[in-house]
Amino acid sequence: MNSNQVNTTHGDILIVDDTVENLRLLATTLTERGYKVRSAISGSLALIGAQVAPPDLILLDIKMPDMSGYDICQKLKAGKRTCEIPVIFISALHEALDKVRAFSVGGADYITKPFQMEEVLVRVENQLTIRKLKQKLEKRVEERTAELKQACHNLQQAQIQLVQKEKLATLGQLVAGVAHEINNPVGFIQGNLTFTEEYIQDILSILSLYQQQFPHPGSDIEQLIEEVDLKYLLQELPKMLASMERGVERICQLSKSLRTFSRSDTQTKVLFNLHDGIDSTLLILKHRFNANEKHASIEVLKEYGKLPEVKCYPGQLNQVFMNLIANAIDAFDESNQDFSGDKVKHHANLISIHSEVNWHKDTVTICIADNGPGISAQVQENIFDSFFTTKAVGKGTGLGLSISYQIIVEKHGGCLTCKSSPGKGTEFVIEIPMQ
């Protein structure tokens, strides 16, 4: 966008930031472009302002003095008057999980500080345009006949594809960048650890030889040996090196999983190992399998068959795996949220992943099942519908399963089905052609 071009998409914008310089810069620039701008320096003031006079868009900093931007966004999404307001996070936080969390609490977009004003202006205009189009579409649906409802559905699907494409691109670039930045220092450490182990072993050999040749080195040396506890050091040093090697290997595995998960899709399908995609997703979500106040630890049971590489769009299938596994974890959170600490610890949670080849159909099947609370028949009828969700306001967009269905059925010519009943867990079955 030309910096001299006046923005014709006017709107009411609320800026929430405790840094006065940021407020002044954003307010001045947006006002010059024809927007009506309000500002708030704390979360509580922002919530009051949004409730009294809901803006068209909110620019929200994450690190605030009284409550975090994540908490502010969740409260906005929980309010009837504010739940539809798009929120763009602006923050110096740039870790992958920070951005993923911003989207998970209902954020529409994310801009990393230090920001470029041209980027801010484009993203503001995009969100205001999307909101106005959505409002216009909703009004038309209410006014038109059943004949136009199908047209509404088609437009809605186009919007979902745009959202999915934007999120995939953003998440893919972000995760790939993190993995790349990890590789350089880890490679340096890993390379030096090998030589360090050899050098220390040589030193230990020389020290051992000295002890054999000079069993009585003198009182000063004997006193120092006793002070530093040489025997303990000789036992622990190799263990410390081995521990560091395992830590570096763990980081390398995580980096590899991030690169696998963030694979950019080409215009045509490519051969891909589906198990690599699942494993990378599990490693990224590993921290959520640990026990917390809402659920006991979650066990993952992998029953992998011998699958050939499958022609597919790897990045899109990874997103499906992420949606289904994350939903299973969310189900445990919701089913156990009223448990006391002891009950949470003794409630066994299991996610099982099974894969096999159907040679008679020339397809592969991936089954992702949990032993959570299950889903009623009524909910299952709408589970793949756009914007349908059973989660609390602000905790889900209703797009995850809808996008997953599009990826499997429309993009890969496969099938995505749900098998569940209350109290007996849920199983999602993915079936895609091998060619």
Image: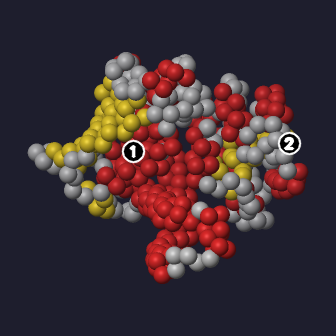
Dot 2: element: loop
- Marks 2 and 1 sit apart, C-alpha to C-alpha, by 39 Å
| Quadrant (top left, top right, bottom left, bottom right) of the C terminus | bottom left
Percent coordinates x, y for residue 264 in the rendering: 44, 61
Give residue 329's mark: none
The three-letter code of the residue at mark 1 reads Phe
Q: Would you say 375 lies left or right of 243 here?
A: left
Percent coordinates x, y for residue 286 in the rendering: 47, 45
Q: Would you say 251 lies left or right of 126 here?
A: left
Quick check: can you spot residue 289? yes
Dot 1: element: helix
Which residue is at a point 81% across and 46% down the rendered structure image?
17
Q: Quadrant of residue 223?
A: bottom right
Residue that badge 1 annotates: 321
Quick check: can you spot residue 402? no
Q: Is residue 387 above or below residue 191?
A: above
Q: Would you say 103 lies left or right of 259 here?
A: right
Residue that badge 2 annotates: 41
Total count of labels: 2
| Quadrant (top left, top right, bottom left, bottom right) of the N terminus | bottom right
Which residue is at a point 83% across and 39% down the rendered structure image?
42
Q: Earlier in the sequence, mark 2 or mark 1?
A: 2
